[in-house]
């Protein structure tokens, strides 16, 4: 499956209601000026709730709103056209103003790969739905992300620190983490 056809399929799973409203408004109007304005607005509205990028990558990158993460991931694995049965990487990321998780998925049946990204601006209580009920390997990856970034995973069966002790304070891979004792000063 090409990136373009994969993008079209995934976009159809999560259509943007605002795009259909803009399209409907354009169809209802008989005024040429209003019609032109509506068509311009329609071009600006993403037809899908998902955002797609290739970022110079050979893999399609999908940015998903966190409330649709679990539904998208479940469909990516169970849909016969995608069959993403292998989660080979799950990483936490601190982009400065946002925390997020990046998932790399592969279909061993079709040999295609996709990257799914989810972000939150909530640095005080970041949380996403767990995908360990979909891919068992996510259980330890999510614990690692929790341990180093403080991102919680809803419905995780055993979310606790994996590498650091329970007494450890803070999350060392966050950009705002400060460790006065172990700081290297040049």
Image (cartoon, rainbow, N blue to C red):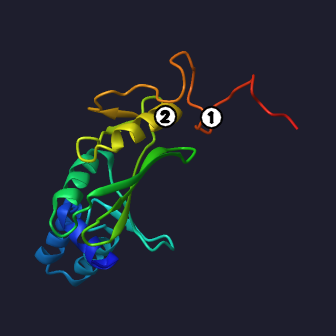
Query: In the image, is 30 to the left or to the right of 140?
Result: left
User: Is residue 155 found left or right of 125 in the rendered image?
Assistant: left
Question: Is disc 1 surrounded by few (<14), some (14 to 19) or many (20+) residues within 10 Å?
Answer: few
CB atoms of marks 1 and 2 within 8 Å: yes
Callout 1: helix, strand or loop?
loop
Name the residue beneath numbered marker 2.
123
Residue 54 — which label?
Answer: none
Of residue 56 and residue 161, the one placed in the foreground of this image is 161
Find the distance from the CA under tag 1 to the CA under tag 2: 10 Å
Residue at 11 percent across and 74 percent down: it is 28
How many numbered marks, from 0 up? 2
For the point 18% across and 80% down, the residue is: 31
- The dot on residue 176 is 1
N-terminal of the pair, mark 1 or mark 2, is: 2
Find numbered disc 2 in the image and state the secondary structure of the residue it sits on: loop
Counting from the top left corner in percent of width and height, residue 157 is at: 28, 29
**Residue 107 spot, x, y in % from top left:** 29, 65
Residue 20 is left or right of residue 186, and the answer is left
Left or right relative to 182: residue 164: left
Q: Give coordinates of residue 176: x percent, y percent.
A: 62, 34
* Viewer-closest of 170 and 23: 170
Is residue 140 shown above or below 95? Answer: above
Q: Nearer the viewer, residue 48 or 21?
A: 48
Q: Can you say whether 18 is above or below 24 in the image? A: above
Outermost residue to the right: 186
Q: Position of residue 18 (x, y in %)?
A: 22, 61
User: Within the image, what quadrant is residue 109 found in?
Assistant: bottom left
Give the quarter of the figure containing the N terminus. Answer: bottom left
- How would you rate the neighbour count of disc 2 (Cα within 10 Å): few for under 14, some for 14-19, many for 20 or more? some
């Amino acid at each position: 499956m090409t990136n373009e056809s994969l993008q079209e399929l995934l976009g159809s799973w999560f259509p943007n209601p605002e795009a259909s409203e803009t399209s409907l408004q354009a169809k209802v109007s008989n005024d040429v000026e209003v019609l032109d304005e509506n068509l311009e607005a329609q071009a600006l509205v993403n037809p899908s709730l998902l955002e797609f990028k290739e970022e110079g990558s050979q893999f399609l990158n999908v940015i998903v709103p966190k409330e649709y993460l679990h539904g998208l991931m479940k469909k990516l694995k169970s849909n016969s056209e995608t069959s993403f049965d292998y989660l080979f990487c799950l990483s936490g990321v601190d982009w400065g103003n946002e925390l997020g998780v990046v998932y790399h998925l592969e279909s061993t049946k079709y040999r295609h790969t996709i990257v799914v990204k989810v972000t939150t601006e909530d640095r005080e209580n970041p949380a996403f739905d767990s995908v360990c009920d979909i891919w068992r390997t996510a259980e330890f990856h999510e614990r690692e992300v929790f341990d180093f970034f403080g991102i919680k995973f809803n419905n995780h069966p055993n979310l606790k620190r994996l590498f650091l002790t329970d007494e450890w304070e803070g999350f060392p891979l966050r950009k705002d983490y400060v460790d006065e004792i172990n700081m290297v000063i040049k």
